[in-house]
Amino acid sequence: MFSLKKIIVFVASIVFLSIHAQEKSDNSIDVSHFYGNIIRHQPNIAHLVQGHPTGIIVGLNKKTNGTKNWQKEYNYPDYGLTMIYEDFKAETLGKTYFLGMHFNFYFFNRNLVFKIAQGIAYNTNPYDKFSNNKNVAFGSSILAGTHLALLYKKDYLIDKFGIQAGIIFTHFSNGSAKSPNAGINTYGVNLGINYSLDEEKKYSEKEIKEKYSEPIKYNFSIKTGINEYFVGQGMEPFIHLNTYADKRFSKKSAVQGGVDLFLNKARKEYIEYVSIAYAPEGNVIDKDTDYKRIGLFAGYELFISDISFESQIGYYIYNPLNYDKDIIYSRVGMKYYFNDHFFSSFHVKTHYFNAEALEFGVGIRL
């Protein structure tokens, strides 16, 4: 059940943002309800799947009007804030509140919308050794969150009101910053209404795109964060270094290829702990096993103004600790370019569905 106090706080936040939005033109608000299922991506979360998660999704959108070239290139997308309340229907998991930034991309005469949002979340009932030791999904209250949606949307159906419906996906985890961290993935269906604060407008046809390319550029970045490999270890810092070449073959897209070096103190302590505490699956791990890893990766980068979305897949060519049997890793995230050469970044590094690290970084492109 929704707590009255929580509903009041949630609605008050929306009202405040709505009032602020009405001071400007070209804004819209949408509110949706969703009903879904938890993906059992690991056997150890089966006991957490007790019902069908439900929740509310609220979006505050700023419409673009083509004043900048990238807006026309992407068919006049929206950008703004997304707020999500999710009840997992399991007392052990509690409830989660999410706040993030999003983009809405339009297709098929602006009736089909793909939405992507990234942000932070707060969970009400994380793991506790004594009071909630069955919550292996969330080791901390503060989480990273990702929200995706594919929606049919009809604006201005009745005056400035419209409807939207479709499928959604949410992911919450702390990126192994604190153990345990199995994370929770939810998919479902949603139905909602939207309200435009400005009059309906017509969008001009896309202009003929000129060919665009850049020579190969060389990048170097340093990423850092914290990890906890096992409960009670304590959070330890890591440094991930990578260097790569990229080739931008259009205004929107670039491909990459490079090498990663992973230096993780928590992993080093984990090797020592396992070598002393037990021998998993009958295999003894030597305490002098090298904790460092090296990987080769290929990637794709999608540019939207000064922001880019990045996805990479890599293969470990050096990983002496083979207990976890991970040979493939992936990385998804965002970069912000201060200028043509310097950028900051935020990524989630994973092994399949398991997040290993939240990486905060800076880099240079030459």
Image (spheres, rainbow, N blue to C red):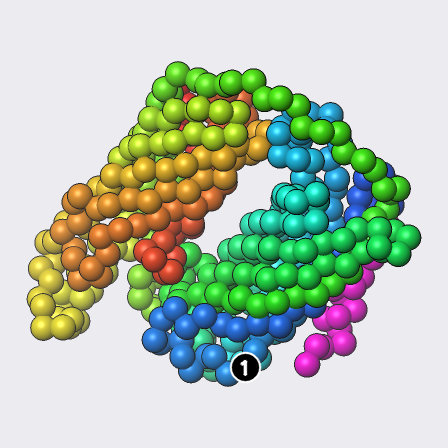
* Horizontal side, residue 87 vs residue 217: left or right: right
* Horizontal side, residue 261 vs residue 161: left or right: left
Q: Whole-percent x and y of residue 344?
A: 48, 34
Q: Amino acid at mark 1?
A: Gly
Q: Residue at 45% across / 70% down in the picture? A: 39
Residue that carries the numbered disc 1 in the rendered image: 51
Residue 154 seen anywhere in this rendered image of the structure: yes
Q: Which residues are magenta?
A: 1-20
- Residue nearer the viewer, 357 or 313: 313
Per the image, is 116 magenta? Answer: no
Residue 219 seen anywhere in this rendered image of the structure: no
Q: Residue at 66% across / 23% down in the picture? A: 207
Which quadrant holds residue 27?
Answer: top right
- Residue nearer the viewer, 15 or 263: 15
Q: Residue at 73% across / 35% down in the picture? A: 64
* Horizontal side, residue 302 vs residue 277: left or right: right
